Image (tube, rainbow, N blue to C red):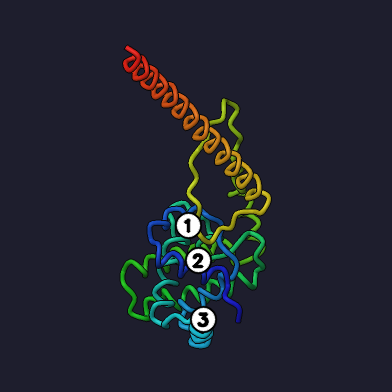
Amino acid sequence: MSRPVALRVALDLAFTPVLAGLAAKQPLPPGMITVLQIAGGSDDTLQQAVDTTGEPADRIRNAVILFLQTVLFTPAADSYRVLGAERSSTQAELRDHMRWLMKWLHPDRERSEWESSLALRVSSAWDDLKSPERRKAYDAAHPIAVTARPTGPRRRQRRTRIPWVGIPQHAIEPRRRYKRAAVFILLAGLAGAAAMVWDDRTLLWGAVFADSVAGVRE
């Protein structure tokens, strides 16, 4: 199998845990079913991930669990996110996600008390969405939030880029042009400063030479 985006994100997050807060705010990446199956104990999916990534099985499993704990079970996560799904997911996909999550978190597998509490969240989320009627009612009660644009003066904010989120090509070219222009201006400024210093030194040595000649004549 090709490496799913969600698996790549999980491995990136394991190597760069400082990005956990940012990852929790990002939309879920494609390929969530792969990481859910690995967490739920699918040996076939885990072996495919080992073959694809070249990473040890234990490292993949630990990265996947850290990723799920980080991005699914945030305090603000809605029932779709808790199931590792999108609002566009089919009913069959929701059921499949719930099944793999419960295999991972089921109390009968001697999970910790904390993981058992996550199982309760999964059960509650599935209860919200387990039928088309319940899902329709949930969507009506929890519409997608629309962020209003600020009306005041805009302030430039520093953005931290996440490694697995690519920069569009149309955004790269202007940056390159700006960098080239900045380098040109800097070099021109340095050249002008060097010329001014050279002129000053020329005048200084000219004055010294004139004084020396005058002294000889006297």
Query: Is 44 located above or below residue 33 in the figure?
Result: below
Residue at the image position 53 percent from the left and 65 percent from the top: 83
What residue would you read off at disc 1? Answer: 23
Using the image, determine if residue 16 lies above or below residue 41.
Answer: above
Q: Does residue 108 appear to the left or right of 46 in the view shown?
A: left
> Amino acid type of disc 3?
Ala
Instruction: Give the residue at mark 3.
Output: 49
Location of residue 203 by image quarter: top left
Question: Horizontal and vertical percent for residue 173?
Answer: 66, 49
Element assignment for label 3: helix
Near mark 2 (Cα within 10 A), the count class, few <14, some 14-19 or many ≥20, is many
User: Percent from the top left, x then y, of residue 108?
Assistant: 37, 80
Circle 3 Cα neighbour tier, 10 Å, few/some/many (<14 / 14–19 / ≥20): many
Percent x, y of residue 39: 45, 76
- The residue identified by callout 2 is 9
Q: Residue at x 33, y 66 (%)?
A: 114
Residue 110 image-quadrant placement: bottom left
In this rendered view, identify the residue nearer to me: 16 or 104: 16
Separation of marks 3 and 2 at Cα, in angstroms: 13 Å
**In the depicted view, which residue is nearer to us: 17 or 184?**
184
Are discs 2 and 1 less than 8 Å apart at CB? yes
Q: Give the alpha-carbon distance from disc 2 to disc 1, as whole Å.
A: 9 Å
Q: Residue at x 46, y 29 (%)?
A: 198
